[in-house]
Amino acid sequence: MEHEARNSRKLGYWETTLAGSADPAAYVPASLVGSNVLREDLPLPVCVLRAAALERNLDRFQRFSEEAGVLLCPHAKTSMSPALFGRQLTAGAWGLTFATGPQVRVAREHGVPRIFYANQLTGAADIRYVCDELRRDPGFEFYCLVDSAAGVRLLADRVATARPGRRVNVLVEGGLAGGRCGVRDLPAAVLVAEAVRAAGAHLALVGVEGFEGLARSRDDGRPEQMVREFLGFLAEIARALDERDLFDTNEVLLTAGGSVFFDLVVSELTAARLSRPARVVLRSGCYLTEDWGAYGRALADVHARTGSAKPALEPAIEVWAQVLSVPEPGLVILSAGRRDFGQDSGNPVALEHVRRGSAQRRPLHNAGWRMAAVSDQHAHMAVPPDHGAEVGDLVALGPSHPCTTFDKWRTLYLVDDDYTVTEAVRTFF
Amino acid sequence: MEHEARNSRKLGYWETTLAGSADPAAYVPASLVGSNVLREDLPLPVCVLRAAALERNLDRFQRFSEEAGVLLCPHAKTSMSPALFGRQLTAGAWGLTFATGPQVRVAREHGVPRIFYANQLTGAADIRYVCDELRRDPGFEFYCLVDSAAGVRLLADRVATARPGRRVNVLVEGGLAGGRCGVRDLPAAVLVAEAVRAAGAHLALVGVEGFEGLARSRDDGRPEQMVREFLGFLAEIARALDERDLFDTNEVLLTAGGSVFFDLVVSELTAARLSRPARVVLRSGCYLTEDWGAYGRALADVHARTGSAKPALEPAIEVWAQVLSVPEPGLVILSAGRRDFGQDSGNPVALEHVRRGSAQRRPLHNAGWRMAAVSDQHAHMAVPPDHGAEVGDLVALGPSHPCTTFDKWRTLYLVDDDYTVTEAVRTFF
């Protein structure tokens, strides 16, 4: 059992800011609080977050990070929900991570004080916005990535024009060969850092960044070695820049970490030794809700690698749909489709069946239900002869990859253990 | 050249209603009108609709339907944009089609007077909402589907409780074996229609419906025969119910039609002969913007089948992204990913390259660019050695399947031929 410290923490700056940033009524429509999903009080389909599991995940991942001696800066693109940003910051997160200009605007409009932009910042309008915010708010901290001398010059030129009144913090991004952004070797990293030094009036080099999660796509069953080597490469970059005295701060940030290999990020990056202090920043985002597919399996792998059951995260996101038709033996059609859940990491699994009007939940995990096909607004479930489903019954679906389910909804609902709504959670994609 | 009659039409009821339903400023933020995509005035990535192509599509598909002697009731789930609903109704559409309860709410809140609900209506909250609207607004016309006696009884019971003050119009849905909803044979259709007759105090049977588009997924290269047989099955259902005098109106609605086989829908359903008049309703939705993939190819098939270049629809939807990195030879990373465009019918194609600051568009159709991989917020483009792209350049992407690109955005922008914004188009997914 984990200690429940979260609720006793003192409220922070961001909470009052978040609370004050918009009409609270927009976050908690009183007419829906108290509505019950199983009683069909809400329009269907609906996406719910199990509040108790979410609160435990918030607490346990924060605790895991603190015990590992790393800062947590969760990737908040997962939910794009200010109501959840506030909970993550309240739980103790150092800052929040974002990936696009529009996402940064949402964060700032809801009072997020420290933003890690885990991407190259290139757009004219986006750079202007960030610089305006840096000038306007002395409390705003911002970090972004660079991976080429051309990109450094573009950013520096645009910052020079936008006049933020202080330097913009950048980290050199290290990349995987065949992967995404990021320098592929040490000489390239040094060239980029030297370009930052040449633009020293406008940019400050504060660390090294990478995203190890792409190794998964080249999974031959054992991607750990590739991930360890990649994280070692990030540490090598940091040492090379440290030796050349190219960092502009006394403390260097070393940061990586999706939600698949975060244990390796902790062990490899905290082992890096530089001439100056280093702080490791973990950026996992999916811990908030976990899932019933890819990230659930990834968590099991973490537990197997570390020989520990920590962090004990639970899937907290579900899509509830209704049986529209049982048109032939072995086929049940549900009222949720590809516009209601993500499919990029596999189709959702069937979790529970509720006979209309009964509120009795029957588990479907091992009942032989399978999502055989998906339309925009329908799921086609292949079911065994004794499926027991009738028109109007409810079925819970468990998605794989929370990011691509969150972004299907403008409002999700926090529910208690009986599926009564306790809060409406708006998203801003 | 098609005659441009649309602009000379008299404004209809829906236009004043749509115009009056919300602050017009919300639809046209003055600060963005006049912004130019190629000049990087807007945050990136951005989804644009080419206004001239969209207006031509609206006119040409309406004209095509009228010349074929069918009513057009476009599937509006494609865009979920009241600003486009209004244009479709103004162009002459008979009504608009929707598929979920939340979609119906959006339509009604924006004043859509006639809704074809191309789905089974089962949810308690959704039925209550529709009945409330029928009671409140005598001008509201609503149609939905039934495909089982159990579903008919569920709907009738809930309508009885909700007391709309008039009967709810239903159509028997015919289905494809192994497909989605819908009765699979004539005896089942008759049983469903008899169940409607038994619930005659609450429901009125007004027609027969089907969705022939599912045949595409079983495409062996020549799905037309299966589609023709399926449409013939719908006509058979109509004849069987007509012979048994199970329709409750003098005029029977016969409706089908996605955006792939609409020519076959026109030819097969208008050929059906009943003892009473029949009106064919076509429900295609993607004609509005077409696409650069699946629906573009489907349109070419229509033209080949009919030996005509009509309707002459043009792709009107594009996602513009920025080059973030050229991290290794043959690889360009763009700032748009699976959260910015659909992938269910294939990845987008690269359309154009614009050197930063130049506004000069270079076509990429045959330049050997290919989207090799996609992350949440990035596209990984495999490119030839002479790709010519630099960090900060802009690239236009052409999506396949408009529905799953529209739903990634809260605001799209109508642009003129020079990519200057003429209107912001909000979506309500």
Image (spheres, coloured by chain):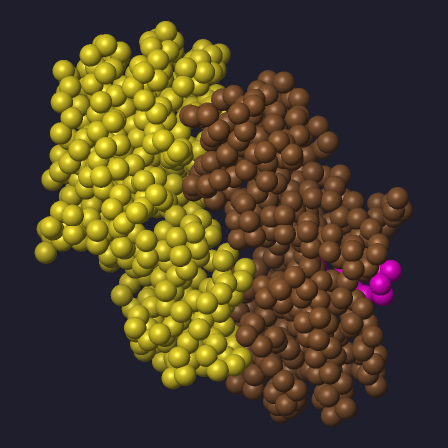
Chain colours: A yellow, B brown
B33 over A322 or under it: above or below: above
Of residue A261 and residue B74, the one placed in the foreground of this image is A261
User: Is residue A112 in view?
Assistant: no
Of residue A375 and residue A97, the one placed in the foreground of this image is A375
Q: Is residue B71 magenta?
A: yes
- How far across and down, in percent of the image, does residue B2 sit? 87, 46
Residue under the image location 35 percent in, 17 percent down: A188
Of residue B185 and residue B201, the one placed in the foreground of this image is B185
- How far across and down, in percent of the image, does residue B109 sit? 61, 57
Residue under the image location 20 percent in, 18 percent down: A239
Is A225 on the left-hand or right-hand side of A34?
left
Question: Total marks drawn?
Answer: 0
Q: Quadrant of residue A1?
A: bottom left
Region of the chain picked out in magenta, as a range = B66-74
A388 over A85 or under it: above or below: below
Residue under the image location 52 percent in, 85 percent down: B150
Is B374 on the left-hand or right-hand side of B235?
left
- How far across and down, in percent of the image, does residue A107 sit? 39, 35
User: Is residue A327 in view?
Assistant: yes
